[in-house]
Image: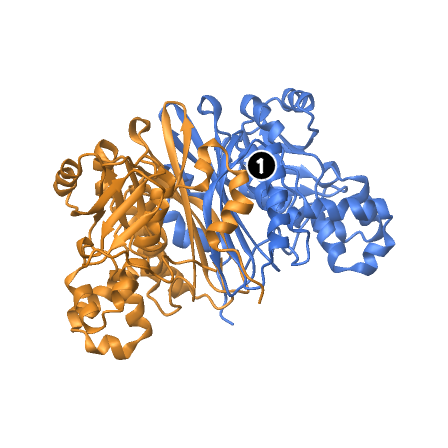
Chain colours: A orange, B blue
């Protein structure tokens, strides 16, 4: 087996050279296209059966996850959803029942999030069900919250709680561990893996008060490092300030090694953001129904992200974030 | 094996109900989004290895085809390309050489067509290489050429020549037949299958002078019927007016049954359009370097498409167009 490029290396080597100005060097969650007086934000994500979801997952949940991971990118950029394109590669054994449930879930989210289906393509595949969604949003007044705007002195904040989905995935794969959790905690973590909660209500606050933002999709540790690099700043965060749900805390209490899974596992679809006035951003977020928690500060210096443990020592992780390769 | 929905039935049943106003009921080549004073045209298509291309095809050609089939949709809608999103599902055996050649082909077309890469997603798949591209275009002055605007009395025209790509695919699968063609004709047909030629230079003429347009991707016979239905008109075309290349004529001379393949096989990526003044549209197209040929007329009456043979009898086809299912 030859040594392989990581996903980021692959993109930087082969595809970043193709990116136009609007593509932001493929270093952000989304692209920003000028369109007359408006600005269009565009993003795409794909889910593959057996890779990003379990074949037996409820089809409606699969559909909603496929849309929501894209809506999360729009939210992080401060954009309002306009619609989405769907390309669906169907394996030979697709059934009308599966597709009906898939479409029903998709319809529910399209309506709830004000993001209608615009078009797309349906093809046959000899491989697994593959769902690719491209979502378009509008950046009101052209405001776009990039990854690259963080400044020394900014507060670093995250929305909601971190690690629930990654722990949910662990529970899917480890029924013995799942059986040791309380039913309520187990169900909550499993649900967070199945159904991300895109923080679209946070978009206006991000436009007003955030210096930089991205969604946490590949793990908080690695994603904060990406943001720091994009902004050419250092990031200092404290592990014990990272907001964990009661369910996640219960899981970590059973096995302390799960804390590393929570902060590097990904699939959070929470918002990581920076602001000169973190309290003002938090207050505006609270008014929008989203809890933000400050986890650290941006510092001048080389672009890196350091997470300090409770003794003030830098935490090290074998793998900072999820990569497909 | 239960009886299955066709691709069109599947879309109408499960996904058309999710389409917003901008999605045009999923009955056109692309969506039309208002964005301030501008209008954004959005479209998506997927290619699966072993289904839409041969695994051994040159990776640069595969990349260019994946982009070009989308550019063809933009051209048909009279739109100018703005950029595209790429989601790439890579099988375990991907190589850097393959990907480098893929990216090089994509870069060449992105540059030549002024359509930069905006972003996307790269994922792993246990299935075949799957390439999904969503392309965005701008409709200058909000002009959008729909499928639904044809009127009785309009001329029906097609760009370029019809059937070359479908015949190229036949030659790929039938080396004995291929060996009976002249090398030049064989190479031309094979090339047309590998590399569509999106008619972007035709877009301004379509905006000015076409009443309706679509790209011919699933076969001329079936696609003209789609246009007639969308416009609620009848379409009358003559088989012997359909423009065939010298290479296609050579193939049809070897086997007259190949004429049906040419007009129903698809993968043409030519433009099918209607105009009150067909001569004026043709003249403007000629100035843009694209040959248009009138193949028939739009008539009042029930929405259907009839192709008359040289004796004036309606031609019938077992299968009017390509369907994935």
Residue drawn 36% across and 59% down?
A102
Residue A294 at what x, y percent from top left? 18, 46
Which one is nearer the viewer's eye here, B47 or B144?
Answer: B47
Query: What residue sits 32% from the left and 65% below the top?
Result: A58
Residue at x-position 46% and y-position 62%: A129
Q: Position of residue B279 (x, y in %)?
A: 67, 22
Q: Local crowd at mark 1 within 10 Å, few (<14), some, or many (≥20)?
A: many
Residue placed under numbered mark 1 in the picture? B110
Disc 1 element? helix
Q: Nearer the viewer, residue B86 or B149?
A: B86
Quadrant of the frame with the C terminus of chain B: bottom right
* Residue B216 left/right relative to B122: right
Give the vertical position of A28 relative to B261 (above or below).
Answer: above
Horizontal relation, residue B317 to residue A178: left or right: right
Which chain letter matches label 1? Answer: B
Give the x, y percent position of residue A116.
Answer: 34, 43
* Residue A20 visible: yes
For residue B299, above or below residue A101: above
Residue depicted at 22% across the width and 58% down the height: A309
């Amino acid at each position: 087996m030859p040594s392989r490029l990581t996903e980021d290396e692959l993109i930087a080597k082969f595809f970043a050279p193709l990116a136009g100005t609007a593509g932001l060097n493929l270093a952000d969650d989304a692209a920003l296209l000028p369109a007359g007086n408006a600005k269009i934000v565009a993003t795409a994500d794909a889910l593959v059966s057996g890779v990003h979801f379990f074949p037996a997952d409820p089809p409606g949940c699969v559909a909603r996850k496929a849309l929501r991971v894209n809506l999360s990118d729009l939210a992080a950029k401060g954009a309002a959803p306009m619609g989405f394109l769907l390309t669906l590669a169907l394996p030979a054994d697709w059934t009308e029942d599966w597709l009906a449930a898939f479409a029903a879930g998709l319809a529910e989210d399209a309506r709830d999030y004000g993001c209608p289906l615009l078009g797309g393509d349906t093809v046959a595949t000899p491989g697994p069900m593959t769902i690719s969604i491209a979502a378009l949003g509008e950046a009101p007044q052209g405001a776009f919250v990039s990854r690259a705007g963080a400044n020394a002195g900014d507060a670093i904040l995250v929305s909601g709680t971190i690690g629930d989905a990654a722990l949910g995935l662990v529970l899917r794969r480890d029924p013995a561990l799942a059986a040791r959790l309380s039913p309520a905690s187990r169900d909550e973590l499993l649900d967070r893996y199945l159904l991300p909660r895109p923080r679209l209500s946070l978009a206006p606050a991000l436009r007003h008060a955030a210096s930089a933002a991205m969604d946490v999709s590949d793990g908080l540790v690695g994603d904060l490092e990406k943001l720091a690099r994009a902004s050419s700043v250092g990031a200092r965060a404290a592990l014990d300030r990272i907001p964990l749900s009661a369910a996640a805390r219960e899981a970590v209490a059973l096995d302390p090694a799960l804390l590393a899974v929570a902060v590097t596992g990904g699939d959070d679809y929470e918002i990581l953001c920076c602001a000169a006035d973190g309290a003002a951003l938090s207050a505006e977020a609270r008014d929008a129904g989203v809890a933000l928690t400050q986890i650290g500060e941006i510092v001048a210096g080389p672009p890196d992200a350091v997470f300090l443990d409770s003794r003030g020592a830098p935490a090290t992780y074998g793998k900072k974030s999820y990569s497909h390769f």
